Image: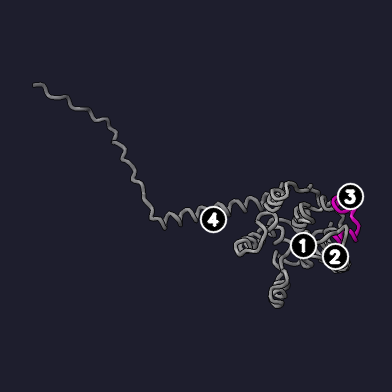
Amino acid sequence: MARAAKKKPTGKKKAQKKKRIRLHPIQWVKLWFRRAVLAVIVFFALGIVGYAFVNPFTTPHIIAEKMRLGWAERQWVDLEDVAPIMARTVVAAEDANFCQHWGFDMRAIRAAIDEGGGRGASTLTQQVVKNAYLWHGRSWPRKALEAMITPFVELVWSKRRIIEVYLNIAEFDEGVFGVHAAARHYYDITPDKLSPVQAARLAALLPNPKERSASRPSPFVRKRAQAILDGAATIRADGRAACFED
């Protein structure tokens, strides 16, 4: 009886099936948590570098307000096309030591702590971070992210760029964002035509623009605007406006 022909060796070993590594549920959670954290870091890193050169198209708060109201007014304007007094009044109103800190005003923070937390201590840089990247409302996760991102914005952006972005995304009335829309909304002029009093009244709306008006200023807004004008003159005289003025 004829022997069955032996199969000739092909010289190739059969590929062994790779064994799938089964992760413990806790390990699986840790793995995806690390990936999520890395993704968030990359996202914000690209956003910080990108916004140093590219103007923000919109922000989370503008999107939320547009969904709520059905509309939102906003038009980008370069800082050189805004009356210089506008930048000075905003700095005097919100962050007089803007040119002297790296994102956190430690003196303002200590003063807020001494007063029991009833006083705000957020710098303009922190407000830009909140407005450009995060959401509004008081929460520890948001404050933690804000604190982590702020130094990187200060590192990558110039002080002038921080002011420029702030003036273009700050809220000045319900659905009114940026100094261009605010100047049109309240005074029907372009932002380069703002007078010192008009600029100070716009700055006086912060940080409660929905409850204050620049066209029909209350006694409080008038008084605050005058104090802001005095502060703007002071920071110009003592050099605290030099980092964002030509």
Residue 53 seen in this snapshot: no
Mark 4 surroundings within 10 Å by alpha-carbon count, few (fewer than 14), some (14 through 19), many (20 or more)? few
**Residue on which the image places disc 1:** 208
Rendered image: mark on residue 188: 3
Write the start and end of the magenta stretch as one range: 183-201
SS for callout 2: helix
Closer to the camera: disc 1 or disc 4?
Answer: 1
The answer to whether mark 3 and mark 4 are in CB contact below 8 A is no
CB under 8 Å between callouts 1 and 4? no
Q: CA distance from mark 2 to mark 4?
A: 43 Å
For the point 62% across and 63% down, which residue is it? 139
Residue labelled with disc 2: 221
Residue plotted at (72% across, 75% down): 111
Q: Amino acid at mark 1?
A: Asn
Asked which quadrant contains residue 136, the reply is bottom right
Precedes in sequence: disc 2 or disc 1: 1
| Disc with the residue nearer the chain's start (3 vs 1) | 3
Q: Amino acid at mark 3?
A: Asp
Label annotation for residue 37: 4
Q: Are marks 3 and 1 in contact (CB under 8 Å)?
A: no
Q: How dense is the environment of label 1, judged by Cα within 10 Å: few (below 14), some, or many (20 and up)?
A: few
The Cα atoms of the two marked residues, 2 and 1, are separated by 11 Å
Q: Say what secondary structure mark 4 lies in.
A: helix
